[in-house]
Image (cartoon, rainbow, N blue to C red):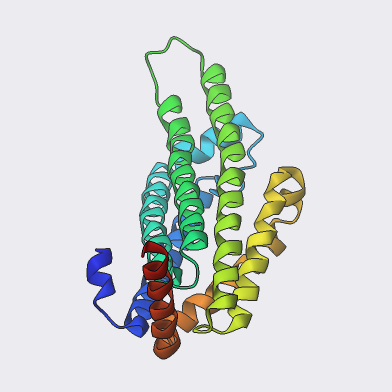
């Protein structure tokens, strides 16, 4: 896939990245809406009442399953976005681009794993052969949701690393507006607040707004404007020359 991507113009690569980025946002947002219908959230699950949580999950099984499915599709799309960013930014610094790629892929792997903690409570509550009472099943389901609530912040921290590194690459690139790099890096630094989940939960709305202010302008710019192909080609030629000199 990457070899095919290398055959198209830099501007087309950027616009393709923007289109996949847009699809990611659509699937992620709609999936989150469905999860919240079931009383859960992929960002900050905050259930504390096992009976209320169980009623929400059992009463919105289809919404929960749909939300998880859409969330996993969004993960796959973001894996693609992460890889496409690597292709775009490797002429700026291959080392930093690889670090960004790794951080982004780790974040998505953790996010995919978190789906277990979203579907797991439903499987527990539907179980009829465990010999446990309804109260015990609800308590186990709540525990699984709460464990999942500890997993999500880890993913966001790795996403923060990915965005900070990509923001740095954008700022240095010369083929994208520097302000986009600043916005993306700022959004990435904001996700580091999730190293202290209680603080992050109290600031969740401002953090989400800052995240959108960082990523949405970048997505729209890539989709509509692409990148400066001449500057990208100059960067790529300089990078190839350096690699040849080192290899020689």
> Residue 145 falls in which quadrant of the image?
top right
Q: Nearer the viewer, residue 157 or 50?
A: 157
| Residue 226 pos. (x, y %) | 42, 84
Q: Which of 123 and 219 is in front in this view?
A: 219
Which quarter of the rendering shows the N terminus? Answer: bottom left
Q: Nearer the viewer, residue 52 or 48?
A: 48
One can see residue 23 in this view: no
Work out which residue is located at the far top of the displayed protein and give it.
Answer: 131
| Residue 121 pos. (x, y %) | 48, 31
Position of residue 205 relative to residue 58, above or below, is below
Work out which residue is located at the far front of the displayed protein and give it.
Answer: 248
Position of residue 97 relative to residue 10, above or below, is above
| Residue 37 pos. (x, y %) | 51, 51
Which quarter of the rendering shows the C terminus? Answer: bottom left
| Left or right of residue 152, residue 19 in this image | left
Image point (38%, 50%), residue name? 72
């Amino acid at each position: 896939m990457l070899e095919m991507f290398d055959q198209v113009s830099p501007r087309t690569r950027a616009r393709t990245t923007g289109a996949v980025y847009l699809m990611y946002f659509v699937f992620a947002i709609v999936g989150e809406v469905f999860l919240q219908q079931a009383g859960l959230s992929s960002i900050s699950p905050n259930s504390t009442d096992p009976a209320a949580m169980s009623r929400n999950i059992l009463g919105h099984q289809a919404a929960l399953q749909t939300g998880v499915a859409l969330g996993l599709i969004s993960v796959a799309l973001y894996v693609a976005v992460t890889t496409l960013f690597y292709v775009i930014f490797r002429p700026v610094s291959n080392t930093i681009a690889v670090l960004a790629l790794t951080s982004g892929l780790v974040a998505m792997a953790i996010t995919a794993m978190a789906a277990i903690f979203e579907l797991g409570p439903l499987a527990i509550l539907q179980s009829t052969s465990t010999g446990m009472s309804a109260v015990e099943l609800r308590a186990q389901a709540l525990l699984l949701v709460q464990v999942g609530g500890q997993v999500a912040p880890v993913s966001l921290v790795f996403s923060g690393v990915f965005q900070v590194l990509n923001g740095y690459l954008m700022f240095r690139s010369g083929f994208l507006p520097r302000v986009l790099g600043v916005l993306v890096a700022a959004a990435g630094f904001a996700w580091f607040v999730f190293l202290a989940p209680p603080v992050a939960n109290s600031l969740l709305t401002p953090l989400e707004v800052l995240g959108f202010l960082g990523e949405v302008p970048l997505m729209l710019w890539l989709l509509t404007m692409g990148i400066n192909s001449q500057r990208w080609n100059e960067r790529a030629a300089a990078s190839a020359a350096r690699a040849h000199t080192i290899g020689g």
